[in-house]
Image (cartoon, rainbow, N blue to C red):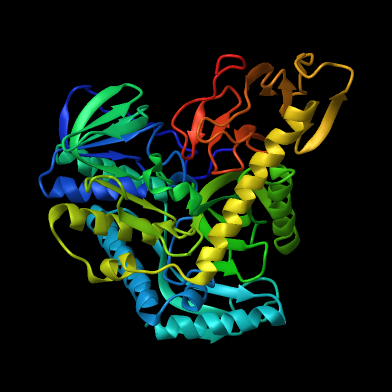
Amino acid sequence: MASIWLDRKKAFTSDPFEAGTTYDTVVAGAGLTGLVTALLLARAGQKVLVVEARYPGAVTTGNTTAKVSLLQGTFLSRLARQYSPQQVQAYVDGNREGQAWLLRYLDEQGVAYQRRDAYTYATSAQGTEKLREEASASTTAGLDVEYVRDAGLPFAVHGAVRLADQAQIHPMQVLDALTADIRSRGGAVVGGVRLRDVTGSSPSAVKTDKGTVRADRVVLATGIPVLDRGLYFAKLQPSRSYAAAVELPEGQEPPPGMYISVEQPTHSLRDVETDGRRLLLVGGHGHHVGRTASEKAHLDGLLDWTRQHFPGAVTTHTWSAQDYLPTNLMPFFGKLPRGRGHIYFGTGYNKWGMTNAVAASLDIAADILGGNLPWAQTIHRRVTSPAGALSAVALNAGVAAKLATGWGPLAAEGLATEGGKVLKRDKERPSATPLADPVPAEGTGAVYRDGTRPVAVSTVDGTTCRLSAVCTHLGGILHWNDSERSWDCPLHGSRFSSDGTLLEGPATRNLPQAGKD
């Protein structure tokens, strides 16, 4: 399930990793946040190292819908319900500066992008109320939006909010340009190296799975911080959503703008040109990571909606992506609490990372280099609203419930489960006696109890793997993802391949084989 952006022949070539070397700044994560931050610091003459567990764009940036828009669904009206006009304005100002910096940079580098009008649309009378609220919040924040009846879609809508002259990009072409630019300024971008910990005062010991380097400062650009010092895993909801690229029948063209629906499940649309073809990219149908009976059902729902609204569409690519949604809505970036003033981070972009990532990078680099961005200082001074506090309570109550329901049945008696359903109950066996190892069918996985241990077993491409079913982050019981064929943690969104290799999330270690944890 490679995204249309990652489906390409060009392979990443890593710089060498040299343990024992000292840098001005080490950046963990080679998505948009990490590479923009690294470039800004390299431009200022810093010696910079970027370490990436896999390769640039492997996680969120390479799986995004890649809209560079200041109209972001109904997000501004949601912000306005919780924050003062000054805070909402600061958010827009930061996104505006992030958008301007990125498009200016692409112009300088000769990287292609497309200008498109952005639309938030409603397909119901109830949805139009949300549209008008969003139009009001956007206008108050200085965005030149208009309410329109016709959004240029091939199906009926009740109305839309339009913001002209936004942009869409090919995210991997952007990362390619940033990587080359960083290297041209003496920086290094290394793949296959995972950050494990940061210890000591400046210069800190930056510990990775390939050895230790030292740095005056460290930037965590890992989607969600992989150091738990700020407890951001308790302030963020990990969300998985789905996307597909489809080819329309001959003579049909994708709609002319970029779109996102008010109604749930969300439907996001844009066009993309590849190999001389203009395809339609459709996204949405998100859910909390690890908390659904079937991920495949969400993807199937998206594809069914696409076929219904674009008859004859032929699917060329399907994929999914992970985002982190802050309980208080506003993104987090800047200095990491309890990071002794030399660890920085960015997270919680609410699925609008193309502008928020660059805004976070601009603030982090300004702080490191002695600058000051007024909009960023306003965001840093925010106070969590009662609604945001209640969202955090609800999120973490759900985490506690998952801990209880995850361990409870397994500890009580021998159970095998798949997609949350009991597959096998063995009351004849003593509680300490292991069950016979199940061998799941191809492409499936199950969690069962072996003595006192939850065990995750799956069969993928003919190979059956038996692993600890306990997430290496904070001990959540893992859930089999039937779409990605991965083990997903319902607590804080860590994900592992069928053989236990860590894919993403706040965890920093692979799953051990069953019985070796």
Residue depicted at 57% across the width and 67% down the height: 260
Q: Residue furthest right?
A: 428
Q: Position of residue 128 (x, y in %)?
A: 64, 82
Image quadrant in which the N terminus is located: top right
Q: Residue at x 44, y 58 (%)?
A: 349
Mark yes or no: residue 482 visible.
Answer: no
In the drawing, does residue 389 fall left or right of residue 338? right
Point out residue 46 in the picture as x, y percentages from the top left corner: 13, 43
Q: How many marks?
A: 0
Q: Name the quarter where the C terminus is drawn.
A: top right
Q: Residue at x 57, y 58 (%)?
A: 393
Q: Is residue 11 visible?
A: yes
Describe residue 135's horizontal placement relative to residue 300 as left or right: left
Residue 165 image offset from top left, x and y in percent: 40, 73
Give x and y (percent) for residue 284. 61, 57
* 172 on left or right of 300: left
Q: Is residue 265 above or below residue 43?
A: below
Q: Up-down: is 281 above or below 190?
A: below
**Left/right of residue 350 with respect to residue 33 in the rendered view:** right
Which of the 4 image quarters holds residue 330?
Answer: bottom left
Q: Residue furthest left?
A: 45
Measuring 41% from the left and 31% from the top, which residue is drawn there? 54
Is 376 situated above or below 436?
below
